Amino acid sequence: MLAIFLKTLPFFAIIGLGFAAGRIRFFTAEATVYLTKFVFYFALSAMLFGFAANLDLSAVFSWAFVWAYFLASSLVWALVAAVALLRGAGPEEAVFEAHTGVIGNVGFLGIPMLTLLLGKAAVGPVLLVLAVDLIVFSSVLTIVITGVREGRMSLGIFRVLAVGLLKNPMIVSVSLGLAWGATGWKLPVPVNEFMTLLGAAATPCALFAIGGSLAGRSAERWPVAGWLWISKLFLHPAAVAFAAFVVFPVERYAAGVMVAAASLPVAGNVFILAQHYGVAPQRVSTAILISTAISVLTVTAVIALVTH
C-alpha cells in the first residue's frame, strides 16, 4: 500500500498546492474560474478526444459493466435520498444529497490519475463510468428539480436535458472521438500531436484547479455533510464492488477500475449545480472539501486492493 500511496501522493500534492495558492490569495478565485474553464473546454476535452479516437469501443463496452455500476450507484442514491426525506428534508434537498453521495470527480481527477496508475487500458472503463454519471444521474437530477419546481413533467424538460448534454464538452469530445475512431482512420500526425500537447496540460491544471476551488469553501453543516462524504467514499465503492465482483460477470480488471472510480471524492460540479439551483450549497461544499482531503488515504487503499 505504501508504494501506491507514493504514486497517488503527487496528484494530491498538486491539489494541495492549488489549495495553498488559493488560501494565501496568490491565485485568486477569478483565476481559478478561468483555469477551470481552460481545463474543461480545452485541455481535458483534447485528452478525452485523443483517448476516445484511439479506443475500440466494441472491445471495452460491456452491458454487465454498465448495469453493475448503474444499479449499485442507484441503490446508494436511493438510500441517501431516503435518509434525507426521513430527516425531514424536501425533495430538492434529498435529490441533491443523493447526487452528492454518488457523483465522484471522475473528469478532473479520475481520468488523469487512474489512467496513469492503472494503465491506459483503464480509459474505456473510466469513460463508461463518466458516461453513466453525466447522462443518467445528471439527467435524473435535472428532471426531479425541474419537475418539482414546475409542479409537473413536460417535454420542455427533455429539451433542456438535450441542450445541456450537447453543451457539455466532455460528452461532445468523447462522442466526436468515438465517431472518428469508428472510421478506422488514424488521426493526422499534426492533429494527434496537437491533441497530445494540449491534453498533457489537463492533469496538472485540473488538479491545481481542484485545490484552488476548495480554498474558497468553508466547512458547514457537519452532521449532514459527514454522512454524505461517508456515503461517497465508503458506501458507494462498497456497493459497486459487490455488484461488479459478486452479482454481475464483469471482467476483473474492468471491475477494479470501476471500483477505483467509485472511490473518488465528490465532484466539484455538484457544488456548481447546487449554487445554480440554490439548493444546499453549504453541505455540498463541506462534503467536497472533506471527501477530497480524506480521499488521499481512501483512494490509495482502494487502488491497492483492486490492483492485488
Image (cartoon, rainbow, N blue to C red):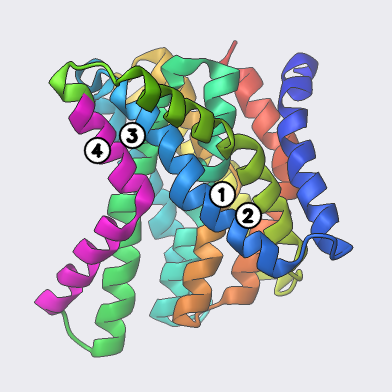
- Answer above or below: position of 307 versus 169: above
In x, y percent, where is residue 266?
Answer: 57, 52
Dot 3: element = helix
> Does residue 171 belong to the magenta stretch?
yes
Judged left or right of residue 134, residue 29 is right
Q: Are marks 2 and 1 in contact (CB under 8 Å)?
A: yes
Q: Residues within 10 Å of mark 4 (few under 14, many from 20)?
A: some
Who comes first in sequence, dot 1 or dot 4?
Answer: 4
Viewer-side residue, 74 vs 134? 134
Dot 4: element = helix
The residues bearing labels 3 and 1 have C-alpha atoms spaced at a distance of 18 Å
Q: Answer whether residue 239 is visible to the viewer in this image.
A: yes
Q: Residue at x 41, y 56 (%)?
A: 77
Residue stretch in magenta = 154-180
Judged left or right of residue 234, residue 242 is left
Q: Are marks 4 and 2 in contact (CB under 8 Å)?
A: no
> Does residue 308 belong to the magenta stretch?
no
Q: Nearer the viewer, mark 4 or mark 3?
A: 4
Dot 2: element = helix
- Give the number of the disc on residue 232: 1
Q: Are marks 1 and 4 in contact (CB under 8 Å)?
A: no
